[in-house]
Image (cartoon, helix red, strand yellow):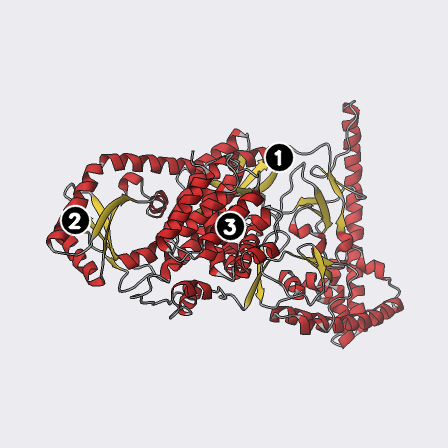
Amino acid sequence: MVSVEERYEHLEKTIRGYNISADLTQIRAAYEYAREHHGEQMRRDGSPYITHPIHVAQIVAEMRLDSESIIAALLHDCIEDTDCSYEDIAKLFSVTVADIVDGVTKLTRVKYSTMEEEQMENLRKMLFAMSRDIRVILIKIADRLHNMRTMEYQTPAKQKKKAFETMEIYAPIAHRLGLAKMKWELEDLSLKYLDPVAYDDIARKLEIAKSEHGQFMSAVQEEITTRLQELNVPHATVYGRVKHPYSIYRKMYLQEKTMEELYDLFAFRALVDTVQDCYNVLGVIHDIYKPILGRFKDYIATPKPNMYQSLHTTVIGEEGIPFEVQIRTYDMHAINEYGVAAHWKYKQGIKREGGEADYEWIRRLLENQEDADAEEFIHSLKVDMFADEVFVFTPRGDVINLPAGATPIDFAYSIHSAIGNTMVGAKINGRMVGFDYQLHNGDVVEINTSKSAHGPSRDWMKIAKSSEARSKIRQWFKRERREENIAQGRASFEAELKHVGLTMSQITASDVLPSILKRVSFQSLDEMYAAIGYGGLTALKAVNRVRDELLQINRAAAMAKAAEEAAARAAQEARAAQEARSALPRKVKSEKGIVVEGLSNCLVKFSKCCAPVPGDEIIGFITRGYGVSVHRKDCPNADPRRRTPADQGRWIKVSWSDDIRDSYTTGLEVVCKDRTNLLVDISTAVSTCKVNISNLNVHTTADGFAIFHLTLSVTDSRQLDQVMRKIHQISSVMKVNRPAG
Ligand code: MN
């Protein structure tokens, strides 16, 4: 067991190793302050809490960051988890340190509740936009790395959630900052929890390969080293390693190969002083071993957008085993391993090509630092890449991207114009604010709407920052004049109607209205009124057509009625006979297991968007002409905030009756890290619950995910829950959803 004090001394030693002017007094003060404030708090593994900030500071020191970064790393959980405040830290240490700790705290508070692919890039951008100082995000990555290293003490659900976030958000950020070492470790640790079976398999096989080929590895290393010495290449270092489990996992997936079929599990590195030596070494390697055609890559002449530079070649050794050799200078190596963090120390000789829009921001980030030196570089590294955008959350956790300076009005209209038009208030992080409040990155925005809202005011057009909001407000005002047209048209239509002795209720009856509208060629009565209002149609003409249609309908109805009565009499007789046969009392039948309040015998259908099953909380919507459509209460289409005033009265209470059917069709969405046999595992899980799959489709994403859509027949929500639990237990499955909306 290493004591806390020993761990701290190790940290100090690491710092002294690269920064002779480090402020060790303040660093020790930060350590003691954090230790005192975390007090008796424990980590899940039973060690004192202070070991966590020390480890995070250790990772930060291995990135060779400045004293303020180390101090902030030691204090990074103080604001979140102890009683100390921003002001305390600013007073005892410095405003900069307090700002960094505050920044890390804000990132810690961001809740990732979405798993949708298109949201991930927004989340990554949001983290950058929130980290005004690059050190904030570097410390946050170090924090996440240590938490991933100690993830085994967490619950399986938390392990999967954190691993997914790490794979989708933190590893890509580490990659863009060029932090290769941390990126690999984050990915390997994530894979361990996302697809434990595959990870264990790869790790075990790598271990076997390492011991089987140890001899071969050291032979190659010696052979290259000797040749370089003979040719007087100065200060050359050569070493071999096996590749990372995640890189092998990815290759197996992308090339659809088993591990046995993959070549280059082994890689060697040669580090030298100069670029010239790199090309010399390449010549030597190709002289000793046979190069594989098309596998040579020159990232020195053309660096990767994250500044990575190296020569790569794959060759075949004497035993027929292929292996990759990476050749680079020591300076390049430091940047390749530590990226942005190392840049201030090793910035000579880097050509930047850029180009890819994805990396535009990092190019800008690096360009700003052209002539800054040492400590100053890291100080001036402000991440103001997304200065013209702001990223906020919906209450459900989706990220909405708005122009900088956006207000709750912009937010409301970006969700839906109906939300904007009925907005009566806004809450930011649970607190009421004015409509002109400027949104900040990471804010959770909630809009209050009301049926009786007066609609937007003309001032809103001035307050709104986005053109989308402004044009939707403009539209509303246009429609507002339309309301006047409608009111006028309606008045003259009704007067004309009275003249011919008809009433409105004769027209608006649900069994005649659709054919009347068809006859006058309008989508709705309002459309017709509007047309009458602005003079596109005379009220007289409209009423004549309506009257003709009504006459026709009534004639048809009379005939149908006569036929129906005859049929009813026949049915009545049949029923009487049936009842005579059966002495048992019978239950009143509901429609498809649904009882609609206040309505009997009405047509019921289950909405496709959320496919409710017995046990779900449900609500009905009286459609125009197709009976009642049943939604889950949590379906976005049933969200009370989305209801238009006109539809409000169509929402109706429905409930499950006692005579539900044997099976109901519903859907599931399953998000997984893709692998072989996944389909078999999922269908096995479903069938062990005695549930039938009636349809299944899958699509895979470029980054190795698979999304399954299953259509199932289940008896009720209990059985569905059981299926969802079973699927969730499958290795590499990350999320099981019931789609809605
Ligand atoms: Mn932490």
Position of residue 151 in the picture relative to residue 518 (left or right): left
In front of the other: 711 or 58: 58
Q: CA distance from mark 1 to mark 2?
A: 71 Å
The CA span between labels 1 and 3 is: 67 Å
Give the image quarter of residue 327: bottom left
Q: According to the image, label 3 marks what residue?
A: 29
Residue type at the position of mark 2: Thr
Disc 1 + disc 3, Cβ < 8 Å: no
- Of discs 1 and 2, which sits in the foreground? 2
Q: Is residue 262 above or below residue 460?
A: above
Q: Position of residue 106 (x, y in %)?
A: 57, 54
What residue is disc 2 on? 225
Task: Give neighbour class at mark 2: few <14, some 14-19, many 20+ (Cα, 10 Å).
Answer: some
Callout 3 amino acid: Ala
The disc, 1 or 3, on the residue closer to the chain's N-terminal end is 3
Label 3 SS: helix
Residue 599: percent from left, percent from top: 79, 44
- Residue 154 vs 316, above or below: the answer is above
Which percent across, then down, holds residue 736?
54, 41
Sequence order check, earlier mark of 1 and 2: 2
Q: Nearer the viewer, mark 1 or mark 3?
A: 3
Residue designated by label 1: 663
